[in-house]
Amino acid sequence: MKKVFVFLFSFIFIGTAFATGENVPTSKSYVDNTLTPKQDVIERTTGAVQVLTNTGTAGEYGTKNIYNSSAAYAGQSDALIDAGTMNAAVQNAIDSEFECVDDDCELVNISGTNVRKSPNLFDVSKIPTRLSSSDTQIINNGDGSITVTASASNSAITTNRRLSILAPELVAGKTYTLSFDTTGTSKSTYFYCYGHTGDNFYWQQNTAKTITNEMLSCNMYFNASGVSTTATIKNIQITEGTDVKPYVAYGNIYMPVGQ
């Protein structure tokens, strides 16, 4: 009888302890029951394949669609694209726009393009590097800029190239605007040839000038900051009209068909 009583007492004690343990913060059931009501409810995505995004606001989330390559582009132009779809799109673009010229495909033709001329009519690559025995020199830096060093007697340094060579598309009688950036204080260019007409052959920075045949036949000079000084000049541009336009490199601009 004593053994039966001890057994029953032990069972009641253990059962009570276990039930009490359910409310101890270290128990699994307590953690599960506490977290459940605190979990943010994520709304259904109405069948769309989406990812969660960070909104930057605590407790709030956003969603973003993932691009469906089998659906129309319209309506999902801002969707995220997976790596596989991106790779396929890039390869398709390469296959449709590039044509190998040689066996190793190191040279290619670009198809489906229209060529538009840059508005910049000045070809800085035509200025040669000229190092002289004196301190007068002009260096083409190969990055669209030139560095000029003036002599002790003359602040203007010749490019040894006529304006018609440096800007072959200029037309006499039309008006063009010259613009450039310089580290020097002299903000003008100068044209010299036999029979030149003096001040008319100075062309100030960011100003318009009507071109003459005489100017086209003259060599173009650049200034530093006076005698025995050096300046770097870049973003040299000549554009048709009287407005200063944002700098664009000389050459062709390739645009997709229809643009």
Image: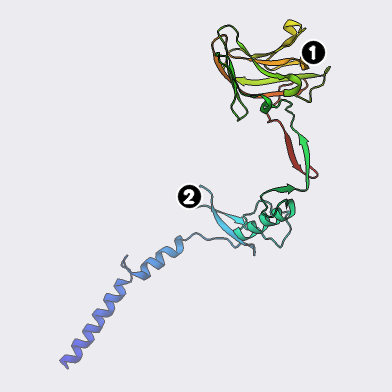
Q: Which mark is residue 214?
A: 1
In the picture, the quarter occupied by the N terminus is bottom left
Which residue is at a point 70% across and 30% down the rendered structure image?
250
1 and 2 marks in contact (CB < 8 Å)? no
Q: Nearer the viewer, mark 1 or mark 2?
A: 1
In the picture, the quarter occupied by the C terminus is top right
Is residue 211 depicted above or below 257 in this figure? above
**Seen from this angle, which residue lies furthest bottom?**
1
205 to the left or right of 228: right
Which residue is at a point 31% across and 66% down the rendered structure image?
26
Considering the numbered disc 2 on the image, is that residue within a helix, a strand or a loop?
Answer: loop
Image mark count: 2
79 to the left or right of 199: left
48 to the left or right of 208: left
**Seen from this angle, which residue lies furthest right?**
173
Question: Where's residue 140, x and y in %?
Answer: 61, 25
Question: Where's residue 235, x and y in %?
Answer: 64, 25
Quadrant hosting residue 154? top right
Q: Residue under circle 2?
A: 58
Question: Where's residue 47, x and y in %?
Answer: 64, 65
Instruction: Say what amino acid the circle numbered 1 marks.
Output: Glu
Which residue is at a point 18% across and 87% down the rendered structure image?
6
Asked if residue 43 shows in the view, the reply is yes
Is residue 75 depicted above or below 186 in this figure? below
